[in-house]
């Protein structure tokens, strides 16, 4: 029987030819060939899908921040803590609800219980010539069964009410903790985005510098061919080109490291290619200087959390003080019990009892435990108040320093802009002068280096300005970017 070996050996044969070859053999062989074809087609589709590069993600700062605050482990842990506080709040409120329980008991009396009757007792069998010490009478049966249900409802309990309020405040403390984590993550992602932009735009400046040096090298070669410049200028311009290449390689490494760090913070897979679609200048233009002319640390998340903790400690004092007050609760119980010598449950005689009432509990003395617990709660409050005062002072100093950094960077920005304009003008003059034979190569190289340094310095100043604004926003808990 003829087979279709070329289908496997000849990779250039089309799939239609292979199917035609498979159709010539028996139906069973054709079905097998069709199965092989489908497998190969599926494998080919998979290979094409794997060969297709992942689409590049155009990443903006807001998208990176949003991705970070929704998937960052620190944020997720903080949210779990808030859910736990919510569960504690529900548990504290549950103390106000009734408690219901059912108890069951079976006992096998190996020796039946007894009770004693005095000798002068009028109870049958107690007197009448018995021993002087009285009579012992057995009671009960071999098997004892008891089933009881109890219910209790708190009517007045100061500790329960104070504990519920404290749990509610603890919920607010955890919410502030989530705000702190989000604020920190936002700042970290923001700075990481600025780091990546600085590395990316520095690479662009160095690439432009390399292009200028290469163009200068080509011009020098042409001038040397016309015997207008010495060979030294050719060598010197070539060295200038090679001196820039290591800087570009370092800038590429810096960019790769900055992008990787940004992906890590923003919860983006490391294998996902990204491109930054914003620029440092864009962020600079969007800042409203009027919104960062003064500062107020009252909205700082850390300070707000300490304020909530202070309220919580005040409520904890009330919780401990509430233990001095009596409590009142209503109760009810219902019980079924029986005893028998056999296991014939159908013939058991069950007796039921029930009762309802009020229970008053008045604490009198507990070994000074309550007094010490109140004392400890007051000390905890003092600690929080000290932390709150110190943090307020520290945040005020840090905010003032951040505002001073912003002012210095803002003043440096104007100087750097003028510096770039001057360096660009000097570079153009030096190039014209050198080409016309008036200037020297050293002057042209110095002008090109000054232009590159001025551009890099401008990026550094913009970067420092944006970082100072980011610190200011974190310290004050406000957004100072104009929308």
Image (cartoon, helix red, strand yellow):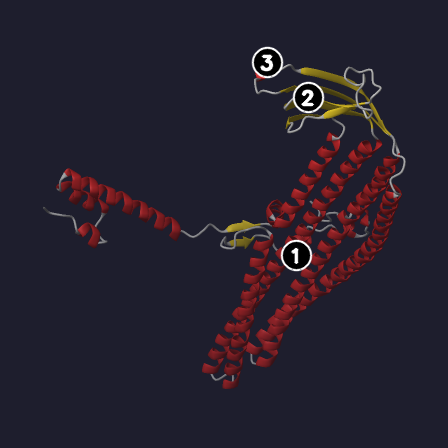
Residue 476, horizontal then vertical, whole percent: 77, 50
* Residue 467 in which image quadrant: bottom right
**Labelled pair 1, 3 in contact (Cβ < 8 Å):** no
Which element type, helix, strand or loop, lies under badge 3? helix
Which element type, helix, strand or loop, lies under badge 1? helix
In this picture, residue 215 sits left or right of residue 60 = left
Q: Going 54% across and 50% down the picture, which residue do you hit? A: 58
CA separation, marks 2 and 3? 16 Å
**Labelled pair 2, 3 in contact (Cβ < 8 Å):** no
Q: Earlier in the sequence, mark 2 or mark 3?
A: 2
CA separation, marks 1 and 3? 83 Å
What residue is pinned by disc 1?
A: 191
CA separation, marks 2 and 1? 82 Å
Q: Going 79% across and 45% down the picture, which residue do you hit? A: 304
What residue is pinned by disc 2?
A: 140
Q: Nearer the viewer, residue 372 or 66?
A: 372
Quadrant location of the C terminus?
top right
Query: How busy is the neighbourhood of tag 2: few (under 14 within 10 Å), some, or many (20 plus)?
Result: some
What residue is pinned by disc 3?
A: 347
Residue 166, horizontal then vertical, whole percent: 79, 38
Q: Going 73% across and 35% down the picture, which residue do you hit? A: 89
Q: Going 52% across and 85% down the picture, which residue do you hit? A: 232
Mark 2 vs mark 3: in front: 2
């Amino acid at each position: 029987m003829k087979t279709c070996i070329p289908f496997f050996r000849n990779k250039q044969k089309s799939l239609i030819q292979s199917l035609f070859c498979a159709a010539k053999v028996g139906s069973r062989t054709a079905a097998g060939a069709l199965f092989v074809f489908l497998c190969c087609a599926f494998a080919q589709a998979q290979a094409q899908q794997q060969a297709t590069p992942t689409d590049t993600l155009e990443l903006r700062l807001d998208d990176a921040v949003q991705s970070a605050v929704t998937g960052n482990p620190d944020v997720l842990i903080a949210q779990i803590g808030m859910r736990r506080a919510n569960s504690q709040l529900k548990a504290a409120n549950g103390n106000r609800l009734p408690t219901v329980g059912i108890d069951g008991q079976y006992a096998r009396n190996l020796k039946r219980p007894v009770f004693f009757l005095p000798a002068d007792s009028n109870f049958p069998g107690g007197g009448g010539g018995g021993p002087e010490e009285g009579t012992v009478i057995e009671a009960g049966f071999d098997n004892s069964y008891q089933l009881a249900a109890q219910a209790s409802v708190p009517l007045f309990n100061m500790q329960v009410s104070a504990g519920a309020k404290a749990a509610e405040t603890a919920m607010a403390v955890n919410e502030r903790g989530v705000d702190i984590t989000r604020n920190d993550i936002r700042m970290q992602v923001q700075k990481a985005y600025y780091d990546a932009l600085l590395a990316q735009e520095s690479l662009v400046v160095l690439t432009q510098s390399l292009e200028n040096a290469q163009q200068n090298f080509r011009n020098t070669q042409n001038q040397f061919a016309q015997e207008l410049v010495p060979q030294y200028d050719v060598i010197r311009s070539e060295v200038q080109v090679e001196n820039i290449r290591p800087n570009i390689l370092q800038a590429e490494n810096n960019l790769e490291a900055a992008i990787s760090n940004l992906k890590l913070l923003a919860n983006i897979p490391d294998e996902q290619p990204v491109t930054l679609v914003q620029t440092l200048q864009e962020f600079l233009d969007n800042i409203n200087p009027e919104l960062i002319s003064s500062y107020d640390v009252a909205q700082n998340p850390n300070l707000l959390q300490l304020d909530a903790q202070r309220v919580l400690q005040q409520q904890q004092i009330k919780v401990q003080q509430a233990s001095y007050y009596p409590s009142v609760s209503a109760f009810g119980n219902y019980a079924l019990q029986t005893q028998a010598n056999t296991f014939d449950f159908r013939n058991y005689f069950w007796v039921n009892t029930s009762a309802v009432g009020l229970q008053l509990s008045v604490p009198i003395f507990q070994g000074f435990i309550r007094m010490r617990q109140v004392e400890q709660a007051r000390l905890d409050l003092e600690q929080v108040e000290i932390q709150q005062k110190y943090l307020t002072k520290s945040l005020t100093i840090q905010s003032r320093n951040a505002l001073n950094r912003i002012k210095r960077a803002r003043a440096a920005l104007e100087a750097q802009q003028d510096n770039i304009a001057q360096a660009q003008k000097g570079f153009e003059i030096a190039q014209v002068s050198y080409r016309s034979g008036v200037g020297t190569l050293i002057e042209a190289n110095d002008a090109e280096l000054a232009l590159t340094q001025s551009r890099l310095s401008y990026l550094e100043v913009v970067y420092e300005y944006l970082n100072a604004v980011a610190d200011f926003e974190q310290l004050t808990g406000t957004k100072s970017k104009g929308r």
